Amino acid sequence: MQVGKEQRRAVFGLASMWLGALLCMGLLVWQKQSVIDWFKLRGYHPSQEIQSVVADAGLTDYGAHLLYVNHPELIADQKIFRSNCPIDFEKTIVIGCYRSGDNGVFIYKVADSRLNGIVQTTTAHEMLHAAHARLSADEKKRVGTMLQRYYDTKLTDDRIRRTLDSYRQGGADTINEMHSIFATEVPVLSPELEAYYKRYFTNRQRVIGQMQKYQREFTSREDRVKRYDAELKTLKQSIDAQQTELQSQLESLDTMQTTMAKYRAEGQIGQYNALVVPYNTAVASYNQLLGALRQSIEQYNTIVESRNATATEEEQLVKALSGDTLPQQR
């Protein structure tokens, strides 16, 4: 049976249409994430403030893209922030969160100017959670191995180790947290990790600089409190020794005074007069030591005041992270 030209054209056209449809479907499957991102970004324009944060954190176009598809929000009101990040705030201070499935990045806009840099660091941290979620299974395994290797062999920052331990105890995915923390808080990583993070940062040291800026506000005060505590410990030992010696001298003076009173009552003037000079010398020594003790106690109290003022400043910084405030020292 012969097929006419018109029929052949119709069959060819139908086949082409189906082939085109299949190609379109295949393209949509292949580019599914890009299509979803396009819809999420359609009509979205990041605020000037968000763009400034992105620039300060040194994000690449891809890093910024991952952030923008989550429509990041900087929220100054703690109650509104908590409503978007429903985490147990009684147990921890949270200043940022990423909703899985690219359903939002929310950052608490810390008002205290002493903590400038924390918004940029937190924003980059949450962006990296979105980045980790997009890694393929093989990529997650490869990157996870690099992160764990660095943790096991090269991580020396005790603060970060304590942070990761707290995540581990809370049942969090520690590899995911390492993925965000190492990039934003560890100045020098292994060459393989540095190469990997270049897909998200034009210059990772930009965000490290932001982190160090606000972290110094904590560490400088922590170091001062430690120095004050060490000074107080040494001074307390000195005060204790001075008080012990002062008590010993007082007992010696009482003994000499009793003996002199006895000599005088018995009319033993020679023996009495022989003790006058030693007694006066002992009194002078006692008064000198008493003056030194008073100075030591005054110095101790001054250091305590400075130590407590510094501790209060540190508490103010912590309160600023949780949205609470304390009167600042003037």
Image (cartoon, grey):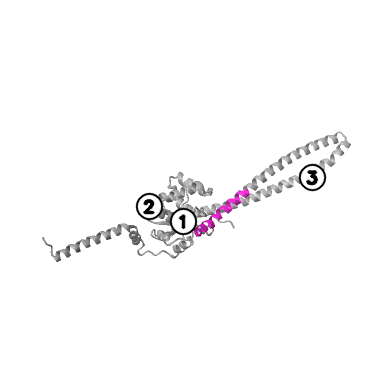
Under circle 2, the secondary element is loop
Picture quadrant of residue 252: top right
Under circle 3, the secondary element is helix
Q: Does the magenta stretch include residue 142?
A: no
Residue 5 image offset from top left, x and y in percent:
14, 66
Provide the residue span drawn in magenta.
204-228
Frontmost of labels 2 and 3 is 2
Mark found first going from the N terminus, 1 or 3: 1
Mark found first going from the N terminus, 2 or 3: 2
Residue found 82% across the figure and 41% down from its top: 279
Residue found 85% across the figure and 35% down from its top: 263
Residue 160 image offset from top left, x and y in percent:
51, 49
Q: Which amino acid type corresponds to the residue marked 3 in the rendered image?
A: Ala
- Most common secondary structure along the magenta stretch: helix
Which of these two is toward me, 283 or 137? 137
CA gap between label 2 and label 3 equals 83 Å
Q: Which amino acid type corresponds to the residue marked 2 in the rendered image?
A: Ser
Residue marked by disc 2:
136
CA gap between label 1 and label 2 equals 18 Å
User: Residue at the right extreme?
Assistant: 270
Residue found 32% across the figure and 57% down from its top: 30
Which numbered circle lies on residue 284?
3
Residue marked by disc 1:
195
- Mark yes or no: residue 78 visible: no
